[in-house]
Image (cartoon, rainbow, N blue to C red):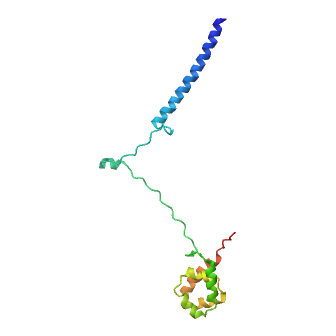
Amino acid sequence: MAGSEGKKKGKKGLIIGLVLLILFASAGAVVGLAMAGKINIPGLTPKKKPIAPPTSTKDKAKIKPKVQPKKEEPPVAAEPVATTKMVDKAGAVKLAEVWNEMPGDKLLKVVDKWEAADLAMVLNEMDSTKVAELLALMKPATASKVSQELKLVASQVPIETQ
């Protein structure tokens, strides 16, 4: 019986030895792959060296320059976009109150140098009959630009403050 007990211990030792051998071999393989740069393990994987530029014209001809992908242009909007955004609606309201009281010919002189987008913000707050009077006094091309901007300003949905 003593012989069979020795064989059992020998088998256990052999199995433990094989398991340890497999563990050490796989750990060694992982460390070797990390040091070779095949897998990335911080602290083991060496840092990559930058590629030196070619020194001769013969070497330069072999290296192809990287082609940048073309950037797609955004689609062009069919409607003209307002050129400015209203920053101070309260200011436009106050100015509209003043302009509503002015005669049309005097008001035309005041707004003559205004940009169409800025003017449309104030006209949006004015009395519609006064706006119509002012547009009738303007040059047709200017009145058309202002009308287009006025349409854009009037169609904007206000952002509600909470």
Q: Is residue 91 visible?
A: yes
Instruction: Check the image and report above or below for 88 versus 130.
Output: above
Q: Quadrant of the N terminus?
A: top right
Compare residues 99 and 15 and report the one nearer the observer: 99
User: Is 139 on the left-hand or right-hand side of 89?
Assistant: left
Instruction: Check the image and report above or below for 126 versus 39.
Output: below
Question: x, y percentage for residue 78?
Answer: 57, 73
Q: Residue at (61%, 15%) from the top-left corner?
A: 11
Q: Residue at (46%, 35%) from the top-left corner?
A: 35
Compare residues 115 and 73 and report the one nearer the observer: 115
Please tell me in which quadrant of the rendered image residue 86 appears.
bottom right
How many marks the image carries: the answer is 0
Question: x, y percentage for residue 67?
Answer: 43, 55
Please tell me in which quadrant of the rendered image residue 6 appears.
top right
Q: Quadrant of the C terminus?
A: bottom right
Q: Is residue 139 visible?
A: no
Compare residues 1 and 133 and report the one nearer the observer: 1
Compare residues 38 and 136 and report the one nearer the observer: 38
Question: x, y percentage for residue 128?
Answer: 66, 87
Considering every residue shown, the one lying at the far right of the view is 162
Question: x, y percentage for residue 114?
Answer: 53, 84
